[in-house]
Amino acid sequence: MTARLQVLVPARGQIIGDPLLIVAVAVIVGIGAASLHGATRPPDGGISGALVRQIAFMVVGTTAFLSATRVDYQSLRSAHVLLYLGGIAALSLVLVAGTLEFGARRWFVLGSYSIQPSEFAKLAAVVTVAALASRREPRPRSLLLISLLFALPTLLILVEPDLGSSLVLVSAWLAIMVAWPVPLRVLGGVGATMLAFVPLAFALAVPAYQRERLAVFVDPNRDPLGSGFTLRQVEVALGSGGATGRGLEMAGSALEGLATRSSDFALAQIGEQLGLVGTLVILLAFAVIAWRGLAIANSAPDRFGQLLAVGITTLLVVPGMLHIAVNVRVFPATGIPLPFVSLGGSALVAASVAAGLLLSIARRQPPNPTERWTGARWE
């Protein structure tokens, strides 16, 4: 059978889907673009090459977003096998033919652009697991199958290595399991088993540079002129921003010279430019995405839509939480981007597709307005 995506024809009044979700995403994208412009603007004025590339990614992301809103998400059920296999193939290929940068092999480099397969593989894994779980009851055999399907891309991403994306995928698995719903005592047992393998995974899969990050997180004064320098400058940047910031085009940034200032430490850059106010706006926007994503899941017309919305919301919100936690020094550095903000095309386009699919779910009316998924059974 050939998988084919169908176009969603929305009911009257459902053309937009969820205006608050759209506004939240637009606010984050707008602040991110303004922050990047201020941080990379050449001394003689104009716009930087980095901003031009990011604008190109924004155009592609917007097109992907609008296209995803028009796709009938229910037709993804017939395409989930191809999506999953494509994601696994891309993750496997990047380990062999990918470009080595910053001690990791995560990207395919095409000229001045790069593609990070893990961003799209995470979404494919969520679609696949939501499709399979929607047809099954949460019994041990089904739980084992779904856990193995999540484990394969997670391990491939961990080997790259990309600890941050692996944590995001594990979070999506946990969220879908709770919504399926798997009994908490069973999840507790699975969690305890996973924790038992943490020392082995740390010894075999965590590279030396990631161990150094963990050591610096525990002891910030370990190497103040080396590996600890970046985290110290991030603290200075957030502190110097004050309540309203130093302005988008400030001089003498504390993040000057850091290669990852607009990617791994995008929030610190915003905090320095726009202060506490700008940071709180970003936090509020992600809170709105979490709220609307779970609301869309709660009102989804079928089980697949509910599980898919929960998984997608996790993919959008958890990276933001991890990025923020890293920037405020409550979590070790993982290299996780801030969705819709950090410099880079793969994360932006993948997040745009995810947000578009959420709106696709929101636009489809349930066949019976009184029908609600309770997390245990359909009523």
Image (tube, rainbow, N blue to C red):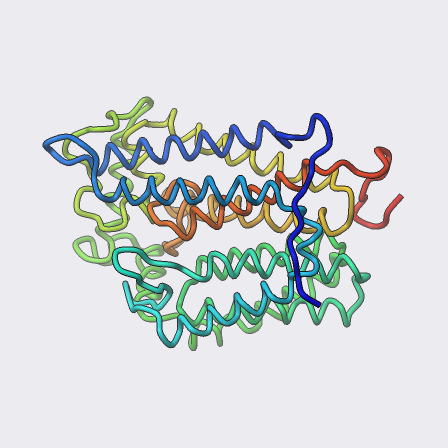
Question: Residue at position x 65%, y 47% from top?
Answer: 310
Question: Residue at position x 23%, y 36% from top?
Answer: 39
Q: Residue 18 sits in which quadrant? A: top right
Question: Residue at position x 76%, y 36% from top?
Answer: 365
**Towards the viewer: 231 or 47:** 47
Question: Residue at position x 30%, y 57% from top?
Answer: 216
**Towards the viewer: 123 or 252:** 123
The answer to whether residue 206 is above or below residue 178 is below
Q: Image quadrant for the N terminus?
A: bottom right
Provide residue 185's location: percent of width, then percent of height. Answer: 75, 60
Position of residue 54 in the picture relative to residue 166 (left or right): left
Provide residue 198's location: percent of width, then percent of height. Answer: 51, 70
Q: Image quadrant for the C terminus?
A: top right
Provide residue 269's location: percent of width, then percent of height. Answer: 29, 37
Provide residue 181's location: percent of width, then percent of height. Answer: 76, 54
Position of residue 109 in the picture relative to residue 350 (left or right): left
Q: Residue 108 sits in which quadrant? A: bottom left
Q: Residue 191 sits in which quadrant? A: bottom right
Position of residue 107 in the picture relative to residue 63 (left or right): left
Residue farthest to the top, as pictured: 244
**Towards the viewer: 211 or 375:** 375
**Towards the viewer: 28 or 220:** 28
